[in-house]
Amino acid sequence: MKRIDALGAALAAVAARPERPATATLHDSPDARLIVFRLEPGQVVTPHTSTSSVLLVGLEGAGMVSGAAGEESIAAGEVVSYEPNELHGMRAGADRLVLLAVITPRPGTR
């Protein structure tokens, strides 16, 4: 068994550049990759696609998630799912947004 403090890891993550969201990989196996994102106000992860299924779980704050049909809000406790090759992105609004991304299977293993 492996116990992971997702919110703690997100809060401790260091961004590669100050204008970019901070991320931390929590788990990485052929079956699934778990990554936390900490987006400070105004930060964006531009829409992109993945060959895997992607679940975004709101851990803290509120913001927006995007898909082919546009943007929708996401808040702590909510989950948004994307099919393989479906466009997805996220952005923080006026407050910090912390999300857990569950990517299955790990990209590149199909």
Image (cartoon, rainbow, N blue to C red):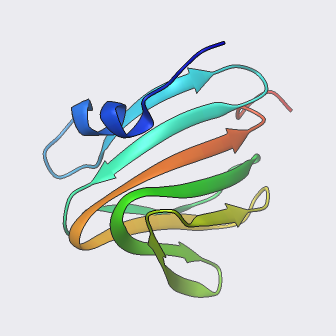
Extreme top residue here? 1
Along the viewing direction, whichever of 83 and 6 lies nearer the viewer: 6
- Where is 65 relative to 85, above or below? below
Horizontal and vertical percent for residue 64?
42, 75
Residue under the image location 37 percent in, 73 percent down: 63
Work out whether 37 lies above or below 14.
Answer: below
25 in relation to 53, above or below: above
Residue at the extreme bottom: 69
Count of numbered badges drawn on the protein = 0
As rendered, which of 7 and 49 lies closer to the eye? Answer: 7
Residue toward you, 34 or 79: 79
Most extreme residue toward the right, as rendered?
A: 110
Residue 39 at x, y = what percent?
A: 29, 55
Q: Quadrant of the N terminus?
A: top right
Q: Residue at x 53, y 75 (%)?
A: 66
**Residue 74, image x and y in percent?**
47, 73
Q: In this view, does 3 lie to the left or right of 105?
A: left
Residue toward you, 9 or 23: 9
Give the vertical position of 14 relative to 81 (above or below). above
Q: Quadrant of residue 49?
A: bottom right
Quadrant in the rendering for residue 16: top left
Image quadrant containing the C terminus: top right
Residue 41 location in percent, x, y? 19, 66
